[in-house]
Image (spheres, rainbow, N blue to C red):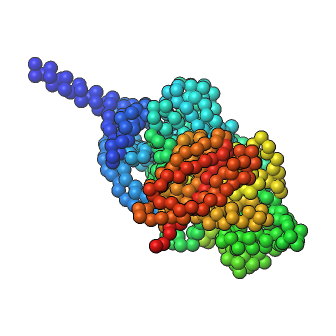
Amino acid sequence: MIMIKRAILIGIIILNTLFAFASKLSSPNGIVRLEIRVTDRVEYDIYKNNTLVMANCGLGLDIKGVDLKNKDLLKSVRLSHIDRQINPVVALKFAQIHDKCNVLTVQLKNGYAIEFRAYDEGAAYRIITNIKGDLKGKIKVINEKVTLPLKEEYELHLQPAKDFTSNYETNYIHPAAKTWKQTAQMSTLPVLIDTKNGVKVLFSETDVMDYPCMFVKGDSDKGMVSAFSGVALEEKKQGDRFMRITKAADYIAETDGKRTFPWRYFILASQDKELLEATLPIKLAQRSAIKNTEWIKPGKVSWEWWNAAAPYGPDVNFKSGFNLETYKYYIDFASKNGVPYIIMDEGWAESVDDPYTPNKKVDLHALIKYGKQKNVDIILWLTWLSVEQNMGLFKTFSQWGIKGVKIDFMDRNDQWMVNYYERVAQEAARYNMLVDFHGSFTPRGLEQKYPNVISYEGVRGLEQMEGCQPDNSIFLPFIRNVVGPMDFTPGAMINMQPEVYGGKRPNSAAVGTRTYQLALFVLFESGVQMLCDNPSLYYKEQECTDFIAGVPVTWDETKALQAELGQVALVAKRKGRTWYIGGITNGTSRKFNVKMDFLDKGKSYQMVAFEDGINAPRQAMDYRKVISQTDREQEMVINMSRNGGFAAVLTEIDR
């Protein structure tokens, strides 16, 4: 009898060792829970409020020459926790972020480990390797497997990509998971998954270094799976700004064998408001590699491309265009309105291939000197290829007095291009220069490691004009802007409803109301927030310009007031003692009450508000400016026109 019991016990131990390890990891408040299983593979389930959100999610890393086909994978398990304060260099939501989570590190055999983290707002994991590699310590990653099973009733919100040259500027699509799984269609990150059980899941990645960006695609059997560009073996130049991969390797990265791989994270929102306040990407990213960051100064930018550098009117006694007199006019406008930068877009140089020879009509050096006299600095546009071929330009530009660069048309997401972004950030930081990436992928954490990377495009923004519709842009605060800064280029002063749109450069126009445009400066987040329109129009609309120019680009606190995915987004943001409110809606007019309980107790505030006018549903430029007094005990009634918005500044009244 004793021998039988001993045999049963030994059998159980063998089964547990060879076939199963299971562990639970909960967030500090217990709301988020991971259940992790290690057999001959690693799987995990995600719970929120004891509701199963994602089940049987899979992960794995295939490395050339490393065999993990062993049912006895587990080596050890370690629990730990993190509790610290983060003070972002460029604080787009909060000046202080409490980073608190519980950590489970699963050490596997053959040099693999997986670090799981459970936060109150979501969960994340990353793979860690400690593999000797070749003589240089390098390994070849054949593929990384990410599998997210999708129930048929899930609704997806994602940005389709035809291939790995995506510039992340397509409109969102909103298919049912049942439909999308059958298509094998590829999507950029981030993606938002509505599980229809009370939880929305935003899935993305951060800390992507020396590694390609992840895409996801539909799979009829597995649901949503990862996809990566192969390492470039051969390339071909197209035009003056593209370098396309014509032959890719059968592996996605050649990298150090001893390293951490990118974080794959899930923000779990029971209310849509939680997405507008989420900070998980910042918590997971690396801290600043730049020790002295005093020179990194976010701010507004006057931009000439959208309005075709065409000021006009009685104060314009010169032929406007890409020339010295026009840029002086932009500098004068910026100076008068407290805007610290202007961007000089394509045309400032004689050739896009030569960043050292300015256009003679522009006289760049005279403009730099003129700008210094007016307290306005200059950011220069460049193609990425020109930068790659002239990395010494950062030193030269710094000597000239240029404060930053806007680098465009990367349109690639392979390992080499990811490394290019970091090389640019490093070199720019050496000379105290800001970087704004256009034609880019979405933020992947580099902006935290190198906070001189002040913004990214990676969005269907206002430069698309009629192609930029509020019905699409309303998703941006819930998806794209959650992962990091977004150079949307707001600020249009010619405003139209979609059925009467007729804008074209130089009379560029935007779909949506005037108030909608004002609200974007509060709602959308970017370290360089553009004023896209013509100074001539801003002068004519000075009270709108005063509001736009006065909105900060960094914030101490963010509070979501009203949020419904695809319908309405309204936030309050604080800078010092002053609050701003900004919100937009889609093609449906709406009315709702908002509590003012985010304001300080016992304080009164003067509120200067911009509301959609009574005729805004037809004439989008109709708005009303209303000045009133309020406090935290009051409720505010907000009316938004279709494709409209609301914007306000609340200034504490001293007693």
Q: Is residue 531 above or below residue 47?
A: below
Pick whichever, 643 or 428, lies toward us. 643
Locate residue 448, reporting x and y percent.
Answer: 52, 59
Residue 130 in sight from this viewpoint:
yes
Locate residue 349, reporting x and y percent.
Answer: 80, 66
Residue 425 in sight from this viewpoint:
no
**Snapshot quadrant of residue 437:** bottom right
Pick whichever, 14 or 621, lies toward us. 621
Locate residue 261, reporting x and y percent.
Answer: 48, 48
Which residue lies most toward the left here? 1
Write the residue at 60% across / 71% down: 432
Write the residue at 83% across / 57% down: 506
Q: Say left or right for 348 vs 27.
A: right
Write the residue at 58% across / 44% down: 591
Pick whichever, 264 or 566, lies toward us. 566
Q: Say left or right for 157 vs 279.
A: right
Locate residue 8, reporting x and y percent.
Answer: 19, 23
Write the residue at 14% across / 22% down: 5
Pick whichever, 166 or 588, lies toward us. 588
Q: Is residue 403 above or below residue 6?
A: below
Q: Say left or right for 595 vs 501.
A: left
Q: How many marks?
A: 0
Q: Is residue 398 above or below residue 488?
A: below
